[in-house]
């Protein structure tokens, strides 16, 4: 209501009328009217000024609302532009369709590669880009996905604008509304032509080099990096008495038994090769004992198999009966070269497959979140908050993809140990990322607890990753027999008497006292396919770092493997290990 005031004692001071600027019950301000000529503001004049104040308040409120709306629209346009930029710059062909499979949009990479306009591609026009021999198969699978409303994929040849065909992996995922109804399909086409060519070449090379090794006059045995036998050529089968089928995956010392002049069995040479990562030659005073028990003096040499990144993949032994000394040194050299080349090609294939598998999930997540954001921004009422959150997920998955790639490349290298300050938490997270798929398949849930002060250690990142991968996978294997129970792996770090302690605990069946006592012995294992070197190598690595490793276990309640590491520039005061 207006409030009127007057001058005191009949003075000529101006009369005032104060009218509030109201929108509903909210006061935006006050309209003040002064007059030195009007003796008194009557009711009509006061009502007129009150109407003027109401009009002014509405105009002020509308101006504020319009300013906020313009800011929201500008933010929405900017977010949509950024998402479109991400969509168009993805290193793959991205697309989305209607619920019935009609193409609605593609990114710039798609249009550029196939040389079609967006109008030509829309609807079902995109089917023309498939190779004629694959078109019917793709259509049948796509119809099945649409009918069943499930994600899926297929490999098919697609024809580029220049007429050449390449193989692509097509993946499609449905997008659903709150009720679960499919409202769109989003997909990604990844070029896998080079990967398939590499895989075919590796397979051809393996067959060719296996044939080569089978035809030479020397006996050849190869193992993996754990000393398990992977190959015997026919000459090796004849000398050892073991067939390839019988010997596959056995510890090499069961097949290749060397004895001295006193007929005592010697430590197998593969262990020395793998331990020293060096070539080995054994003099002819030693003999080979065959499966049947016969003995023959042999000339044997061995070497580690190193791939192009410097990682040791196993060992090879080349030997012959002394009656075959007329075999030329060229055949021996050729066999080593063939094995080295086969190892390099195999390593290249393994790395390519690993990268493709690990990178596919974050890339698909980027596409899905980017597409969802575009849907939110293009709706009648743009949901800025949801769109911004989805953009954050796009960035997160992009960083994740880069981290996966860096971790895989780091493990593939086998350079000299580089001991220095590093974050043990980052090492643990890298290992959990690399083993995530395996743990998921085994139904294992991982819980981590990091003590804030227990992080910086002095060590070699790659060697510590090797230790943690061994402990994590052993823990997962220990819970394999659990039925109807939660399989939980706990990873904990803490500071302990000047050292940093890392513990990996499983909820498995535990170890008996004898097994726990011998857990770190070389060649001791409780696994049907193991050779017992994993924990022994772990102990060597940890002790070389100035730490200790031990196991605490309770039968039926699981086991905890712990190790300590010195922090940088510490006195290396050590934790007491449990009895």
Image: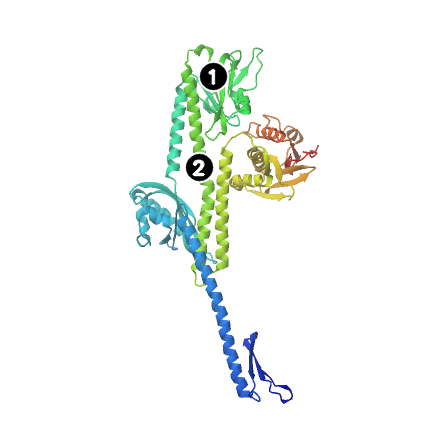
Name the residue located 55 percent from the left edge and 77 percent from the top edge. 21
Measured from the top left, where is residue 344 in percent x and y?
44, 29
Measured from the top left, where is residue 446 in percent x and y?
58, 43
Which quadrant holds the C terminus? top right
Answer few, some or many: residues within 10 Å of disc 1's Cα (few below 14, many 20 plus, some between 14 and 19): many
**Residue for badge 2:** 353
Measured from the top left, where is residue 329 in percent x and y?
42, 15
Q: Along the line of sight, which residue is nearer the eye, 166 or 9? A: 9
Q: Are marks 1 and 2 in contact (CB under 8 Å)?
A: no
Does 413 appear above or below 267?
Answer: below
N-terminal label among 1 and 2: 1
Q: Report how many numbered discs are placed on residues in the image.
A: 2
> Residue 83: which numbered mark, if any?
none
Asked if one can make out residue 111 in the rendered structure from this viewpoint, the answer is yes
**Residue for badge 1:** 319
Q: Residue lying furthest front in this view?
A: 12
Measured from the top left, where is residue 509 in percent x and y?
62, 37
* C-alpha gap between disc 1 and disc 2: 34 Å
Name the residue located 53 percent from the left edge and 13 percent from the top edge. 286
Mark 2 element type: helix
Name the residue located 49 percent from the left edge and 65 percent from the top edge. 68
Asked if one can make out residue 478 in the rendered structure from this viewpoint, the answer is no
Name the residue located 46 percent from the left edge and 39 percent from the top edge. 355
Q: Along the line of sight, which residue is nearer the eye, 297 or 453? A: 453
Answer few, some or many: residues within 10 Å of disc 2's Cα (few below 14, many 20 plus, some between 14 and 19): some
Which quadrant holds the N terminus? bottom right
**Residue 532 quadrant:** top right
């Amino acid at each position: 209501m207006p409030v009127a005031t007057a001058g005191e004692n009949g003075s000529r001071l101006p009369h005032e009328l104060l009218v509030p600027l109201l929108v509903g019950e909210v006061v935006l301000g006050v309209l003040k009217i002064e007059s030195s000529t009007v003796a008194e503001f009557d009711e009509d004049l006061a009502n007129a000024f009150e109407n003027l104040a109401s009009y002014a308040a509405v105009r002020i409120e509308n101006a504020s609302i319009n300013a906020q709306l313009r800011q929201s629209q500008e933010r929405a346009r900017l977010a949509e532009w950024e998402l479109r930029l991400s969509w168009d710059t993805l290193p793959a062909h991205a697309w989305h369709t209607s619920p019935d499979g009609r193409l609605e949009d593609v990114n710039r990479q798609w249009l550029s590669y196939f040389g079609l306009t967006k109008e030509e591609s829309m609807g079902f026009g995109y089917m023309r880009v498939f190779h004629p021999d694959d078109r019917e198969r793709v259509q049948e699978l796509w119809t099945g996905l649409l009918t069943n409303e499930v994600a899926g994929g297929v490999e098919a040849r697609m024809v580029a604008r220049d007429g050449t065909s390449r193989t692509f992996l097509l993946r499609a995922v449905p997008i659903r509304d709150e009720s679960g109804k499919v409202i769109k399909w989003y997909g990604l086409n990844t070029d896998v032509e080079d990967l398939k060519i590499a895989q075919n070449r590796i397979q051809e090379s393996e067959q060719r080099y296996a044939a080569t090794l089978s035809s030479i006059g020397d006996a050849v045995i190869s193992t993996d990096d754990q000393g398990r036998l992977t190959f015997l050529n026919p000459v090796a089968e004849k000398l050892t008495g073991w067939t390839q089928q019988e010997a596959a995956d056995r510890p090499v010392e069961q097949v290749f038994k060397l004895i001295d002049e006193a007929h005592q069995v010697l430590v197998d040479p593969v262990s020395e090769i793998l331990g020293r990562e060096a070539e080995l030659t054994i003099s002819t005073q030693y003999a080979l004992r065959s499966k049947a028990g016969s003995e023959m003096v042999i000339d044997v040499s061995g070497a580690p198999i190193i791939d192009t990144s410097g990682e040791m993949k196993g060992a090879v032994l080349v030997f012959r009966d002394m009656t075959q000394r007329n075999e030329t040194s060229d055949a021996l050299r050729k066999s080593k070269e063939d094995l080295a080349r086969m190892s390099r090609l195999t390593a290249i294939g393994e790395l390519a497959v690993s990268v493709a598998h690990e990178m596919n999930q974050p890339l698909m997540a980027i596409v899905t979140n980017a597409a969802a954001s575009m849907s939110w921004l293009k709706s009648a009422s743009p949901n800025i908050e949801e769109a911004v959150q989805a953009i954050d997920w796009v960035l997160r998955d992009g960083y994740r993809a880069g981290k996966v790639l860096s971790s895989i490349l780091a493990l593939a290298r086998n350079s000299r140990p580089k001991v220095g300050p590093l974050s043990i938490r980052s090492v643990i997270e890298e290992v959990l990322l690399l083993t995530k798929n395996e743990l998921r398949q085994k139904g294992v849930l991982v819980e981590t607890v990091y003590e804030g002060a227990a992080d910086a250690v002095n060590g070699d990142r790659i060697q510590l990753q090797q230790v943690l991968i061994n402990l994590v996978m052993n823990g997962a294997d220990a819970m394999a027999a659990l039925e109807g129970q939660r399989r939980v792996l706990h990873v904990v770090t803490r500071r302990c008497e000047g050292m940093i302690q890392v513990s990996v605990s499983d909820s498995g069946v535990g170890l008996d006292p004898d097994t726990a006592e011998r857990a770190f012995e070389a060649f001791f294992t409780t696994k049907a396919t193991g050779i017992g070197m994993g924990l022994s190598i772990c102990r060597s690595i940890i002790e070389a770092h100035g730490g200790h490793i031990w196991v605490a276990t309770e039968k039926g309640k699981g086991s905890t493997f712990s190790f300590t590491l010195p922090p940088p520039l510490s006195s290396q005061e050590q934790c007491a290990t449990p009895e």
